[in-house]
Image: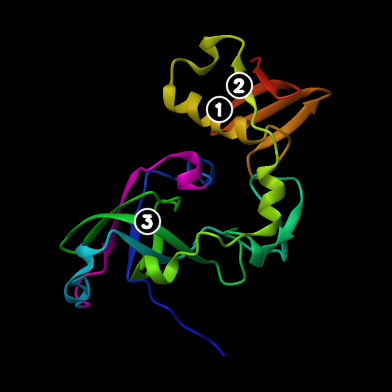
Amino acid sequence: MTISLEPIGIINTPYTAPYDAPRQPRVDDRVDEAVITLTPHRNFEQALDDLDGCERIWLITYFHRAQGWKPRVLVPRGRTKRGVFATRSPHRPNNLGLTCVELVRVEGLSVYVRGTDLLDGTPVLDIKPYVAYADAFPTSTVAWLDDVEALPSYRIVWQNDALHGGDSDLRAHVERVLAADPHPHPYRRIECIDEGLYELAVRDQRFRFRIDDTTVTILA
């Protein structure tokens, strides 16, 4: 069977590269605003009726920049590969995404939302309301996440404040990534460059650091 889907619009976000996006918006406490622009001349104005009465909505999207997939993947925080169907990896057999976001407002064919981790230009396939009594299962668990939650949180020390150049956003990003898990990981762009010396890549910048128990010291 072949299924053909046509996007209803695209979402524009502040995130142009995978490492720009929050690991999970609620985990990273980032709630940047984004806007979904629906395709004109398809009667979507009527389809949006009553949506502004929703506090949260589901976005079904297509991960257009994800290339290829593997049955087992390395999750962002953790050092064990997991079955892709048990993860939120964007690299999937059909590259479909499901994201719950806060609805800010609806203006014409523009739907403003907050709290997404989608990359800029991601095609949107559908919008559905989040219905708390049907969609929320607060006691539901994912067994392998218990292992991840058991990992320690790391304290970040800058050897010299000049290393982040006074850029508060850059500093916050570096600290978020390393506090979660500073060990080598391709998704977080961390590698070991020498014995006891590691390097984090952020865009075209590199931050070298060492790990002492649960303290990360950024050296250069």
> With 210 as the anchor, is 135 left or right in this view?
left
Mark 3 / mark 2, whichever is N-terminal: 3
What mark, if any, has residue 156 been given in the picture?
A: 2
- Which residue: 44% across, 53% down? 118
Highlighted magenta segment, given as a residue range:
24-42
Q: Amino acid at mark 1?
A: Glu
For the C terminus, which image quadrant?
top right
Amino acid type at image mark 2: Ile
- Which residue: 50% across, 24% down? 171
The reply to whether the magenta stretch includes residue 146 is: no
Amino acid at the residue labelled 3: Val
**Of all residues shown, which one is farthest toward the front?**
139
Could you tell me residue 94's position as x and y percent? 57, 72
Q: Say left or right for 194 vs 176.
A: right
Side (left or right) of 136 relative to 148:
left
Residue 32, magenta (yes or no): yes
Q: Which residue is mark 1?
A: 175
Pick the front one: 153 or 175: 153
Q: 113 or 144: which is nearer to us?
A: 144
Residue 154 position within the rendered picture, expressed as x and y whole percent measured from the top left: 65, 27
Q: Earlier in the sequence, mark 3 or mark 1?
A: 3
Location of mark 3 (residue): 101
Q: Is residue 67 above or below residue 219?
A: below
Pointer 1 or 2: first along the chain: 2
Q: Quadrant of residue 160?
A: top right
